[in-house]
Image (cartoon, rainbow, N blue to C red):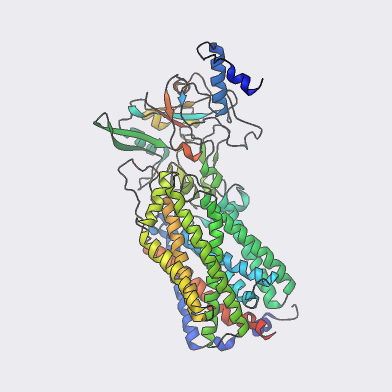
Amino acid sequence: MTNKSISAIFAETAEPRLATPGMNKATIFFLIVTVVGLSCGVLAFIFGHHVIYNNTREMPWGMLISTYAFWAITSTGLCIYAAMSHVFGGTRMGIISNRMVWMSIICIMGAFATIGVEIASPHRMLIYNILSPNPTSNIWWMGTLYGLAVGCMIIEFAGIVTGLARVALILGVFGAIAEVLANSCLGGVFATLPARPYWYGAQLPIYFLTAAFLSGAAATILFNVLAYKIRGEQMSHAVHLGVKSAGKAMTLVLILYTVATFWRLVSFYVGGPELGRTAADALISGPLSINFWVVEVCVGLLIPFMLIILSRLENVGMMAIAGFLVLVGQFVARYDLVVAGQIVPQNLGWDGLPSYFSYIPSIFEFGVIAGGIGVVAFGFLMGERVFGKTFTQKEHH
Amino acid sequence: MNIEDLENEKNEGIENMPLQERRKFLQMGLAVTGVFLGGSVLSLTSASHASSQINPDLDIPVEGQYPYPKHYSMVMRQNRCIDCERCIEACKQTNHVPDAHGAYRTAIQERLTTENGVEKREFRPVLCNHCNRPPCVRVCPTKATYKDPETGIVVMDYKKCIGCKTCMAACPYNARYFNEEKYAIDKCNFCIDTRLAEGKKETACAAACPTGARIFGDLKDKSTEIYRLLHTPDTKIWVLRPDTGALPNVFYMNA
């Protein structure tokens, strides 16, 4: 490695034929989306987070937190599948695992970009997360573990690019372990708050991990199909098998996730605190019901399930649409989860409060979301261009 | 003695039990629930240890074994509140609470209830409950909020607050808000810095209350009114959201 200059490494990994005018335009477009979108978040530091975002005392968390969770969960899923195939060879996804590692890093960057402008004083976080850590805090563990995971994955990816397979393998395992633990702590952030019955409970961390397996498989299918789409090439048989393998995983987890969602909601109607039931009502028949029934259930679960069956795990285009719809459903599912946990006033019955608070994300929040999508799309395109050969190299072995 | 023999025993009844014996039994029950208050206590455990950092060996505390050198609490004599909001104003002045929407350390909630067919307006003063198992303290990533080791008051170290708002999500009492001037989360601290530090014995809100609805004091000090109120026999005492297990230190009664 040491003998190779950086430019020589990039010469080996880059895919110059992807530098087409169309690709250039798309890359620049997403770069602009990233800059403009995240600028909305930068405005929060100038004019105040309380001015720019529509969060309130009663609903301190909004769409930025849910989107952070969405990207973090997707990153975990990608990382787990990559490590499973890379290390254990348990699936046929090994052939596409390099791309998955890259996209896992990119998705966590999307997550960090989103939460970075959500937190009021991130500079204090950098200092006091180290100087004054609180070991009982899920947020502390989650941040630390995701930080650790991304560090491991970046070294892992550097190992992949430079041919240090052993480094890549070991760091890949550590990265995946850190991602799973971080994901679990992310679930724990919500699951350990008895004040919020809609979140509180032992199921949520497992639910988050299930969501990671679902989003990860969906993202694997989508990004791989897109990678070949932009190349204008047919997938090789081996890559096709890898995508098929992700499709199988997605189908299985779709069922698990649907079952988990069903029982999660049923549990609120058999007893327990009124706050939890009223929150569940928000999804079933209240202000979040269109989100839930139309997007979460139909777009995010039923239609992808039907598409997967129709595709017979052969038609990758159809599978990619299913993967995309799963991701849309998961995005909205995270939003509904975060909002439903706070939407019912804790002092319901007093002050003439309605059953539900009203929360509509501000235009700036939507801007930051677009910025996060921009980060992931830009990262994907740049990855294909700069490391394209690394992603496909296993095909030629 | 086996169970059959026990079944054949005649019930002694409690009427013949000596007073001392009954007291001992009551004390045991109160100690087990972590409460050592003489009133009729509903689901509250004022002195259960929560902050093991103070004394990790501390088990269920009984009188004389409170977790903190002082044990500041507040009693709300709810039926005395007339919603004059002098407490809110005094708090804002004393603690420099910004004049912004949603910015308050204490509030008064109200609702209409019907009692014996007559409609009645009910007021309920609320503020931070300075819980003994404070969810906000547990979740804070940087220990920006913590139990003051001297007083058990839940306080803020503003410079450490990253503004993640997890404490706001965790609080069962909606007691926290984002202070745009400090650019950190703010909350009631029983006027620890603005009044108690100056030797005053009451919080601003309690001092401003014209009806004596808010009684503040050190529960460990038997000469305080709060001690007397909480140890008055046959007083119905309750806390807010006992189901969350936060072990609040603000007690409600109608007295």
Q: Is residue B70 visible?
A: yes
Q: Position of residue A377 (x, y in %)?
A: 50, 75
Q: With A338 as the anchor, is B9 left or right in this view?
A: right
Residue at 50% over, 77% down: A319
Residue at 54% over, 83% down: A228
Seen from this angle, which residue lies furthest left?
A: B118
Residue B188 is drawn in which quadrant? top left
Who is closer to the viewer here, A345 or B27?
B27
Residue B28 drawn above or below residue B172: above
Who is closer to the viewer here, B21 or A324?
B21
Q: Position of residue B251 (x, y in %)?
A: 44, 30
Residue at 48% over, 54% down: A264
Who is closer to the viewer here, A363 or A149?
A149
Q: With A13 as the anchor, is B86 left or right in this view?
A: left
Residue at 49% over, 45% down: A194
Q: Position of residue A291 (x, y in %)?
A: 38, 62
Q: With A178 as the anchor, is B192 left or right in this view?
A: left
Residue B220 drawn above or below residue A116: above
Who is closer to the viewer here, B14 or A85?
B14
Q: Is residue A57 visible?
A: no
Residue A90 is drawn in which quadrant? bottom right
Residue B7 is drawn in which quadrant? top right
Residue B139 drawn above or below residue B13: below
